[in-house]
Image (tube, rainbow, N blue to C red):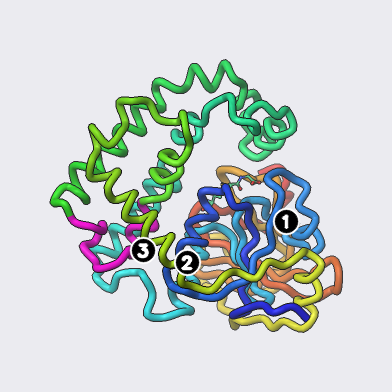
């Protein structure tokens, strides 16, 4: 039986900027974990064997509980391994949540994607284009001409994001966005699209550099160093093959209790209803169908069974940016 430290398995590929949010969190906290590396495009046979349909990367499992979306994953890890990196101060907590929505939801990442140089190997691979068209629903959105046409406006938006950081949160020369001693959740929520773009040769024009935005670039360097040190001194992840994870699931436990159904939930769903849950913005053709076991203002959990081994798993999604619907309501037409 393979060792699965803390019963945590992270399913990801290393160049995913979203997955790095979780890798950094685990490294900065020194939390031992296992990883199951995935291909950058479908099919992902390991996840198919586990019967997890959600297609976005990363996914994290703790025992037989599977967590989708980095926002939910970070919140879960932070509460399961106290004291976390999240602030106790409601003002800072609000900022964390707003930074998360600014970077993940409100278009920074979408604009950053438009700056990917069109000569990178993936960008020239028709299979990658097809995969990402299905993922985003934007047919032709990855074509060279379209990308190049979108670039100037994307630069305007990304420059605006650099300017915001330079002139507000980092303006007084602090090391970390919440003036902490070490990187906090605020840094993790804010840093990742900037980190991704500055790591990608050719993504940024000369007008977005350490000359115009010295504080942002210095913060990125500090963050890179902090993560590199944590990686060097911390535990190395255990790398598992998909078949090892399937084997592990045969004896793993469900780690979270379930059963809480909000009687006032606007959707009026009941415990045991056959439902489907899926993300609204991207990856929406991949839905998890199962019995509803938890429905709170922040979370929906469905119970289903692994394809290999027939073990019950719980798939957790946040409510923000996700849809849940009863199967008999012809969810496929929604
Ligand atoms: N809101 C999601 C977004 C995740 C996401 O879009 N991940 C990208 C990888 S960086 C993805 O899944 N791309 C398509 C794929 O890999 O199948 C999160 O925070 O986890």
* Residue 132 against residue 81 in the figure, above or below: above
- 309 lies left or right of 144: right
What is the magenta range? 174-190
Q: Residue at x 33, y 65 (%)?
A: 184
Give SS at disc 3. helix
Q: Nearer the viewer, mark 1 or mark 3?
A: 3
Residue 151 figure quarter: top left
| Residue 157 in sight from this viewpoint | yes
Main SS, magenta residues: loop
Q: How far is the residue under mark 1 from the one under mark 2?
A: 34 Å
Asked whether 74 falls inside the magenta stretch, the response is no
- Provide residue 41's location: percent of width, then percent of height: 71, 43
Question: Which residue in the protein does label 3 denote?
Answer: 185
- 292 lies left or right of 227: right
Q: Residue at x 84, y 73 (%)?
A: 310
Q: Nearer the viewer, residue 261 or 44?
A: 44
Question: Which residue in the protein does label 2 denote?
Answer: 232
Earlier sequence position, callout 2 versus callout 3: 3
- 105 lies left or right of 249: left
- Provide residue 240's location: percent of width, then percent of height: 72, 67
Question: Which residue in the protein does label 1 denote?
Answer: 53
- Provide residue 208's location: percent of width, then percent of height: 31, 31
Earlier sequence position, callout 1 versus callout 3: 1
């Amino acid at each position: 039986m393979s060792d699965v430290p803390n019963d945590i398995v992270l399913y990801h590929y290393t160049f995913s900027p979203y997955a790095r949010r979780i890798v950094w969190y685990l490294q900065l906290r020194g939390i031992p974990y296992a990883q199951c590396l995935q291909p950058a495009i479908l099919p992902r046979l390991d996840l198919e064997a586990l019967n997890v349909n959600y297609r976005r990367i990363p996914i994290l499992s703790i025992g037989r509980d599977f967590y989708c979306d980095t926002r939910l994953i970070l919140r879960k890890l932070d509460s399961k391994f106290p004291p976390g990196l999240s602030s106790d101060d409601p003002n800072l907590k609000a900022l964390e949540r707003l930074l998360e929505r600014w970077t993940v939801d409100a278009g920074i990442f979408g604009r950053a994607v438009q700056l990917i140089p069109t000569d990178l190997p993936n960008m020239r691979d028709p299979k990658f284009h097809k995969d990402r068209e299905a993922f985003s629903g934007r047919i032709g959105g990855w074509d060279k001409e379209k990308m190049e046409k979108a670039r100037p406006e994307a630069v305007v938006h990304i420059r605006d994001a650099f300017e915001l950081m330079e002139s507000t949160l980092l303006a007084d020369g602090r090391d970390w966005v919440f003036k902490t001693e070490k990187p906090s959740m605020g840094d993790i929520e804010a840093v990742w699209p900037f980190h991704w773009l500055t790591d990608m040769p050719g993504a940024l024009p000369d007008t977005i550099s350490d000359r115009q935005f010295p504080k942002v670039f210095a913060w990125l360097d500090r963050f890179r160093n902090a993560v590199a040190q944590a990686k060097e001194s911390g535990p190395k992840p255990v790398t598992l093959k998909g078949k090892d994870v399937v084997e592990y699931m045969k004896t793993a436990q469900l780690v979270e209790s379930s059963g809480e159904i909000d009687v006032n939930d606007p959707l009026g769903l009941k415990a045991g209803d056959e439902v489907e849950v899926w993300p609204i913005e991207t990856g929406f053709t991949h839905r998890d169908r199962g019995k509803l076991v938890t429905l709170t203002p922040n979370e929906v959990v469905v119970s289903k069974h692994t394809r290999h081994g027939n073990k019950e798993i719980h798939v957790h999604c946040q409510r923000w940016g996700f849809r849940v619907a009863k199967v008999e309501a012809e969810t496929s037409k929604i």
